[in-house]
């Protein structure tokens, strides 16, 4: 009986110790949780306080007269005036320098069809610098209406007023085909622009080129302004074809002949149709068509 009582008392003591230990651990856990929550609360309050203070300071800075824009420098505009550039950018005199979102201003400027790239910088306390890179029209393209094309083959705007005067016209591409097969036709447009640059390098002024017809099956055909000479260039490469064309023109000039059509869409030969000089000495085929002349140049 005594042993049972001792065993019972020992069990009660152990249970009490376990309960006390668990209770103490629970209090420690609650204290830790409370301290963590307090720390995060104080941190959050500190962040909110700093944010509110920053907003107040920012609002005060926006009211300071010495941060108002007093000098604006605009560079790179030819097709548009500096006043038009500022209007597109939404910048007006006396605007606060801190209130300007430079990234948004660049996006607004680049939304203009004439502007390819824009850069905006501010110099405290009161200066703003705007630099733009305008698109340079290299040709016109007929897509139901005339559009301007830059040197990268980008069709960037419809022709208005006197824009694009004296530029060659690219024809043969239909508007609906351009968007359905954009990659293919963009490549052909770039080929036409490359051919124009090659002509200039070979001493052929662009003013003498009135039209370049683009045909996905036949390639490029050039029409000149003087005597409306038709030159079939076909597909690239055009370097040797241009050298051959130059030699043909020199040879025709030496013989006092004027070409009507020159077909260079062959590897080593060219076919030239010569304009009749007079009714008496022209050589004609049946039907009155001028005879083709094969030239190996």
Image: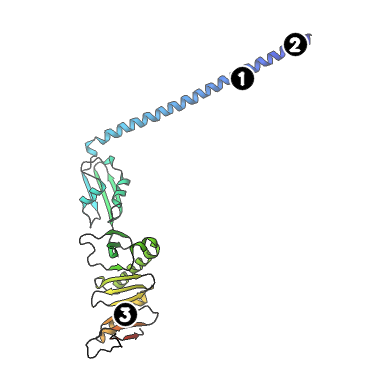
Image marks 2 and 1: residues in contact by CB distance under 8 Å: no
Separation of residues labelled 2 and 3 (CA atoms): 125 Å
Query: What residue is pinned by disc 1?
Result: 22
Task: Between label 2 and label 3, give the one nearer the viewer.
Answer: 3
Identify which residue, 60 or 215, lies in the foreground.
Answer: 215
What residue is pinned by disc 2?
Answer: 6
Residue found 30% across the figure and 31% down from its top: 56
The numbered disc on residue 262 is 3
Extreme residue in the bottom direction: 280
Query: Counting other residues with Cα less than 10 Å from the Cα at mark 2, is it few (<14), some (14-19), or many (20 or more)?
Result: few
Quadrant occupied by the N terminus: top right
How far is mark 2 from mark 1, CA to CA? 24 Å
Which one is earlier in the sequence, the residue at label 2 or at label 3? 2
| Residue lying farthest to the front in this orientation | 287
Q: Residues within 10 Å of mark 3 (few under 14, many from 20)?
A: many
Residue 183 place in picture, x, y as percent? 40, 62
Answer above or below: position of 265 versus 18.
below
Q: Residue at x 62, y 18 (%)?
A: 21
Classify mark 1: helix, strand or loop: helix
> How far across and down, in percent of the image, does residue 121 sit?
29, 47
């Amino acid at each position: 009986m005594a042993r049972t009582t001792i065993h019972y008392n020992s069990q009660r003591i152990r249970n009490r110790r376990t309960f006390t230990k668990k209770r103490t651990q629970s209090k420690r856990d609650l204290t830790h949780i409370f301290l963590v929550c307090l720390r995060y609360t104080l941190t959050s309050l500190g962040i909110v306080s700093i944010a509110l203070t920053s907003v107040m300071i920012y609002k005060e800075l926006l009211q300071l007269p010495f941060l108002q824009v007093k000098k604006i420098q605009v560079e790179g505009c030819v097709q548009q005036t500096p006043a038009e550039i500022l209007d597109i950018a939404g910048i007006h005199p006396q605007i606060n320098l801190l209130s300007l979102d430079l990234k948004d201003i660049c996006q607004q400027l680049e939304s203009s069809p004439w502007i390819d790239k824009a850069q905006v910088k501010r110099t405290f306390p009161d200066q703003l610098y705007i630099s733009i890179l305008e698109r340079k029209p290299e040709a016109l393209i007929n897509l139901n209406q005339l559009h301007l094309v830059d040197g990268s083959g980008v069709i960037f705007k419809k022709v208005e007023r006197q824009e694009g005067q004296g530029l060659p016209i690219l024809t043969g591409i239909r508007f609906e085909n351009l968007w359905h097969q954009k990659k293919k036709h963009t490549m052909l447009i770039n080929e036409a622009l490359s051919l124009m640059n090659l002509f200039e390098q070979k001493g052929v002024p662009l003013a003498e080129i009135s039209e370049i017809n683009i045909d996905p099956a036949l390639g490029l055909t050039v029409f000149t302004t003087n005597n409306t000479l038709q030159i079939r260039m076909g597909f690239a490469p055009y370097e040797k074809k241009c050298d051959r064309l130059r030699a043909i023109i020199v040879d025709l000039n030496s013989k006092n002949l004027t070409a009507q059509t020159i077909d260079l869409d062959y590897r080593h030969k060219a076919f030239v149709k010569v304009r009749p000089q007079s009714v008496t000495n022209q050589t004609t085929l049946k039907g009155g068509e001028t005879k083709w002349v094969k030239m190996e140049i």
